[in-house]
Image (spheres, rainbow, N blue to C red):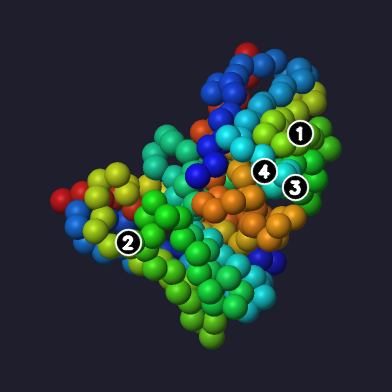
């Protein structure tokens, strides 16, 4: 199975700050990577797919980048509504696997 | 619009079988794949398995021996059955529509609200 390692596990940032979350795959996943946002009590929502494509309705302050085994999610100008947990997911190989998550809080 | 909704028992006894239903609207099961994904309390996400638009299935090898996914296209429903439940199967269970990535793997653009299943005697 492909292991997805996210860092950091938790993050505290101020409003307006730029935040970056990293995801490392245990082998090359050829940009078959998605990012999700999950707020407490809710189901995950798709933010980014194919490593850098913005999902419909997602604010442009969210962006994804990376290739090979290293990927990142960047949030520009952090808003209060961005407080959530974030997960990466690879869909290059079975079983499709998720990272352990990053919990983003306001400082 | 696309909607998915899970239903099933909230409490299952150890060693028993879990049966869940995902009822979809706004999409056709003969044109879309649907996966089951679970999340233990306070933990991460685990993909369990998928039923493809042609009715074929693929499962996570970690639970393949206990899991079965099927569907009734006339009722727009997808079913999950998992046997030999243990306490570590306590989780929120989600169904989600799969969208195709570069190599036909799936990411998930529509999710149900989830159903919490507790395994306890």
User: Seen from this angle, which residue lies furthest right?
Assistant: A60
**Residue pointed to by mark 1:** A66
Image height check: is B68 above or below A62?
A: below
Q: Which mark is residue A29?
A: 4
Task: Using the image, name the chain to which the residue with label 1 belongs.
Answer: A
Per the model, the C-alpha gap separating discs 4 and 1 is 11 Å
Label 3, residues with CA under 10 Å away: few <14, some 14-19, many ≥20: many
Seen from the viewer's position, the closer of residues A32 and B5 is A32
Per the model, the C-alpha gap separating discs 3 and 1 is 10 Å
Q: Earlier in the sequence, mark 4 or mark 1?
A: 4
User: Seen from this angle, which residue lies furthest bottom?
Assistant: B74
**Residue pointed to by mark 3:** A50
Q: Residue at x 75, y 47 (%)?
A: A50
Task: Using the image, name the chain to which the residue with label 4 belongs.
Answer: A
Which circle, 4 or 1, is nearer the viewer? Answer: 4
Task: Using the image, name the chain to which the residue with label 3 belongs.
Answer: A
**Residue pointed to by mark 2:** B66
Element carrying mark 1: strand
Q: How many marks?
A: 4
Q: Which mark is residue A19?
A: none
Q: Earlier in the sequence, mark 3 or mark 4?
A: 4
| For the residues bearing labels 3 and 1, Cβ distance under 8 angstroms | no
Q: Residue at x 67, y 40 (%)?
A: A28
| For the residues bearing labels 3 and 4, Cβ distance under 8 angstroms | no
Residue A9 visible in the current orientation: yes
């Amino acid at each position: 199975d492909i292991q997805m390692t996210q860092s950091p596990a938790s993050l505290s940032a101020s409003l307006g700050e730029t935040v970056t979350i990293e995801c490392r795959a245990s082998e090359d996943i050829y940009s078959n990577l998605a990012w999700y946002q999950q707020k407490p009590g809710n189901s995950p929502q798709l933010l980014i797919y194919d490593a850098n494509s913005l999902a419909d309705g997602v604010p442009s302050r969210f962006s994804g980048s990376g290739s090979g085994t290293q990927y990142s999610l960047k949030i520009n100008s952090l808003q209060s509504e961005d407080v959530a947990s974030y997960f990466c997911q690879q869909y290059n190989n079975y079983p499709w696997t998720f990272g352990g998550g990053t919990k983003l809080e306001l400082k | 619009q696309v909607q998915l909704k899970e239903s099933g028992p909230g409490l299952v006894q150890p060693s028993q079988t879990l049966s869940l239903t995902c009822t979809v609207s706004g999409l056709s099961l003969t044109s879309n794949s649907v996966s089951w994904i679970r999340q233990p309390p306070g933990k991460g996400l685990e993909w369990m398995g998928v039923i493809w638009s042609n009715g074929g299935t693929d499962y996570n090898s970690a639970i393949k021996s206990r899991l079965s996914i099927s569907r009734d296209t006339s009722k727009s429903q997808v079913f999950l059955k998992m046997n030999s439940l243990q306490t570590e199967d306590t989780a929120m269970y989600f169904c989600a529509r799969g969208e195709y990535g570069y190599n036909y793997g799936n990411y998930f653009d529509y999710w149900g609200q989830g159903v919490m299943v507790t395994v306890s005697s």
